[in-house]
Amino acid sequence: MGYVGLPLAISFAKRFNVLGFDVNQVLINNLQHGKSYISDVSPEDIDRVLGQSFCPTTDSSKLKDCDFLIICVPTPLTKDKKPDLSYIKGACEIISGFLNKGQFVILESTTYPGTTDEIVVPMLEVSKLKAGKDFGVAFSPERIDPGNKDYTIDKIPKVVGGINKECTKIAALLYASIISEVICVSDAKTAESVKMVENVFRNVNIALVNELALIFENMGINCWEVIEAASTKPYGYTPFYPGPGVGGHCIPLDPLYLSYQAKRYGIMPRFIETSAEINDFMKVHVVNLIRKGLNRKNKKIFGSKIVIMGLAYKRNIEDVRESPSKDVIEELIALGANIAVFDPFAVSIKTDVGEFSSEASIRDAFREADCAVFMTDHDIFKKIDLFEVGVEDGLPIIIDCRNIFEKCNGYNLIGIGRGDINNTSIYEDSN
Ligand code: SAJ
């Protein structure tokens, strides 16, 4: 019943009787009281089906009566950056406890090709039933884009791959009941691979543009202007943008799932792993830019007040999972800085050096700040008049990681990819 399972359950509840199962009692209590904790699902959406065709529960004994069981659990990385399949295994353990003939299990969690065949099927066959014969199994990657109002779940084409052709067909029929386009592929590992490719594509392209930003910064070229001009090419080019690193629970993690499995087949996925390293380096680069910016005022990171503007991993959402802001805060604390944070959506962020709660206002955050680091390009930040918020204490150095202040006039700013990294002059007020 997370950001994938809940919208899916509510969609299916329009057509079928749905059990929304979760091990988290708090989530289930919320749902049983019609409360939503997922921005894409309104309380009205829940209210329409609650108690009729949608039944939230933590009681796994009810699952034995379900025809289809769809697993939507997290697939994070372990501390040493290996796939953590403990949630998938936990779900399979629960299901195999009561699995009966005729049931059908679908995995939606993003994972490496082979997980369904190598992990899910054997765990379910502990029930002594035979997959593909006594019960069905398929993989169908989740493609939810949290907060995307244009592409709601029914409008996003659904890829489906079963452990045999019949399973593919049955799973496709199920999804076709709520999703307008269903794409059948040869088998489960092909379907797992489709999702991997979608996310590796994003990760490596972001890494490429981050590397270009580092190159152009040192050549005094504005990478953002280059990308904007390159985007005028009507074919064969897809714009990606540099930033302080890659956050979220998908893009930074999924490529390492694929590279893990590739190595088990003896292939060294250098490009994928180098991309992850480049994206990780951007957080180090942000700290370097802060150091350069403070140097302009003959200050050091040690003892400076630095405000982190933006905790969420991307614009206009509150999600801080894998956010680059966490790493940057930890490094700055280690270097002796005093940290304040502000985010209009995320109220706080947990780090290895404690929890940081957002200041009440931008003005509060800027008070006596030596440096303000814009990590997330929330729309509200684009409206800030820096002269207005910083005036009484003098303007802090601005580190712009997202080209928010592209038309900077009259304040001391360094930006990722802007080509001003070595400018010593403070921007003269051109008005
Ligand atoms: N980012 C950049 N530069 C870019 C694009 C993104 O630095 O040009 C950064 C973002 O700031 C963010 C991270 O990368 O920190 C990931 O951003 P994202 O836009 O890929 O969004 P996510 O992680 O929320 O989810 C993506 C979405 N895929 C898209 O095509 C937008 C979402 O639809 C998928 O459901 C999700 O991957 C997934 O589950 O694969």
Image (cartoon, rainbow, N blue to C red):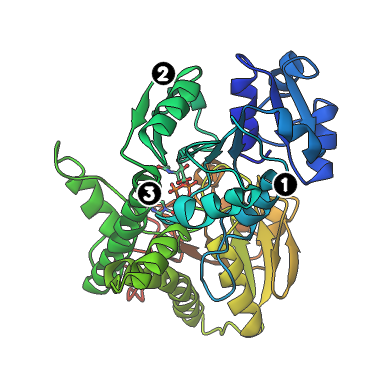
Question: Which residue is identified by label 3?
Answer: 189
User: Relative to 70, is 83 above or below?
Assistant: below
Question: Which residue is identified by label 2?
Answer: 180
**How many residues crowd around disc 1 within 10 Å: few (fewer than 14), some, or many (20 or more)?**
some
- Mark in the foreground, 2 or 3: 3
Left or right: where 303 falls relative to 244: right
Asked if labels 3 and 2 touch by Cβ distance under 8 angstroms, the answer is no
- Foreground of the two, 155 or 408: 155
Whether residue 415 appears in this view of the structure is no
Instruction: Inspect the image, locate mark 3, and give the three-letter code of the amino acid beneath it.
Output: Lys
Q: Distance between the residues labelled 2 and 1?
A: 34 Å
Question: Which residue is identified by label 1?
Answer: 97
User: Residue at coordinates 63% horizontally, 60% vertically from top-left?
Assistant: 86
Q: What element carries label 1?
A: loop
Q: Could you tell me residue 127's position as x and y percent?
A: 65, 47
- Mark in the foreground, 2 or 1: 1
Q: Which of marks 2 and 3 is nearer the N terminus?
A: 2
User: Residue at coordinates 55% horizontally, 36% vertically from top-left?
Assistant: 135
Instruction: Inspect the image, locate mark 1, and give the three-letter code of the amino acid beneath it.
Output: Gly
Q: Could you tell me residue 350's position as x and y percent?
A: 71, 64
- Foreground of the two, 413 or 79: 79
Q: Could you tell me residue 97's position as x and y percent?
A: 72, 46
Instruction: Inspect the image, locate mark 2, and give the three-letter code of the amino acid beneath it.
Output: Ser
